[in-house]
Amino acid sequence: MKIHEYQAKDLFAAYGIPVKSYILCRTPDEVVSAYSQLNVNKVVLKAQVLTGGRGKAGGIKLADNPQEVQTRSEAILNLKIKDIPVDRIIVTEAVDIKKEYYLSIVVDRNTKSALLMLSSDGGIDIEEVAHSTPERIHKFQIDPMLGTPDFFTRKVAFTLFSDIKLVNQLSHIIKSLYMLFIETDASLAEINPLVLTDDDKLIAVDAKMTFDDNALFRQPKIAELFEPTEEEKKERDAKSKGFSYVHLGGEIGCMVNGAGLAMATMDLIKRYRGNPANFLDIGGSSNSEKVVQALKLLLKDDDVKVVLINIFGGITRCDDVANGILQAFEQIETDIPVVVRLTGTNEEAGRALLRDSKLYVANTMSEATRLAVNISLKTY
């Protein structure tokens, strides 16, 4: 689960991490009023969207008079950043920046611990730093039995600073960020950039946090902050129907029974130069209503050009699955081509039931996948 920058800053402040105060606004008039209320020479206007890349997209602007505040806030509120419309802005005092740094804590599943990362190259190009010069990003495993004692946080801080005053500031921020990370069941807590001001103060001018969905039941205050995107709404709706669904953005809608088979199906689609639209595991059921709901979910995606139904009949009989598919298409009208592959128990009987339908029936997984990819590329 993601939260907005301003919500993360509230959490930072509650744990003693230095941040600048802000005012949240939803209209240009509110932004102008906030500028007057802050009573400072220069402010930063920052779009609040649940995605990265705001700076490069024009979602962060400086302003130092009411006219600039008005025009630049209007421009930001008319933006779409990665197809997400901007509907709110925070107004905060601009900081005189001497140097930018990067600091984050993430879950490292390989070591089953938290990973602390920091770099002297903070800012909007941190991803390029990670790609081109990964040695400039320092990484430290946090022992879950020890946490962040003083000797550890000072050792880490000395990788960036030699001035003991700055070392102590960074040590405090690391300890506070880790405590926040652990106590809120976060999967990411990031400060980018962490800035050094002209008066040698370290301030988190940006804040980003994501949380473990499986732990939200014990984090009611965090769960209240959830603002699902359209895709997250689809995923939550699918989960309520007993499906495992993840939107991927391709053209081939996949309906598969079994997570491993679903992964293999997507791999094969990519091998044949296609793009899966989703991961969808409907589980081991031939229930026609379940097939109907799964198809409706797939067909809501405007990018889907073809549906691939890939079923392995183990305990589930393929003829039962075929009957379920036919009953489903009695309730759904669509012009989108549908490719079906059935294999396993009673597979021949299942294919025979589908042979006179408008569905494309394939004997093997490879054949079905090639067919779906060719249809999606309009070469079939």
Image (spheres, grey):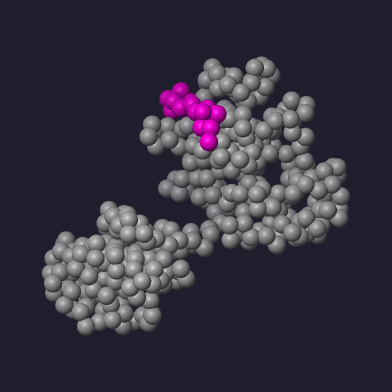
- Along the viewing direction, whichever of 120 and 154 lies nearer the viewer: 120
- Along the viewing direction, whichever of 286 and 345 lies nearer the viewer: 345
Residue drawn at 80 percent across, 58 percent down? 71
Write the start and end of the magenta stretch as one range: 132-147
Q: Quadrant of residue 99?
A: top right
Query: Horizontal and vertical percent for residue 58?
Result: 69, 52
Describe residue 252's horizontal placement relative to residue 196 as left or right.
left
Query: Horizontal and vertical percent for residue 229?
Result: 53, 59
Residue drawn at 30 percent across, 77 percent down? 328
- Along the viewing direction, whichever of 377 and 99 lies nearer the viewer: 377
- Along the viewing direction, whichever of 31 and 333 lies nearer the viewer: 333
Q: Quadrant of residue 333?
A: bottom left
Residue drawn at 39 percent across, 37 percent down? 109
210 vs 138: above or below:
below
Assess whether residue 145 is covered by the magenta stretch: yes
Task: Please give the count of numbered marks on the rendered protein.
Answer: 0
Quarter of the image with the C terminus is: bottom left
115 vs 39: above or below:
above
Describe residue 4's horizontal placement relative to residue 184 as left or right.
right
Q: Is residue 278 visible?
A: no
Q: Residue furthest front?
A: 379
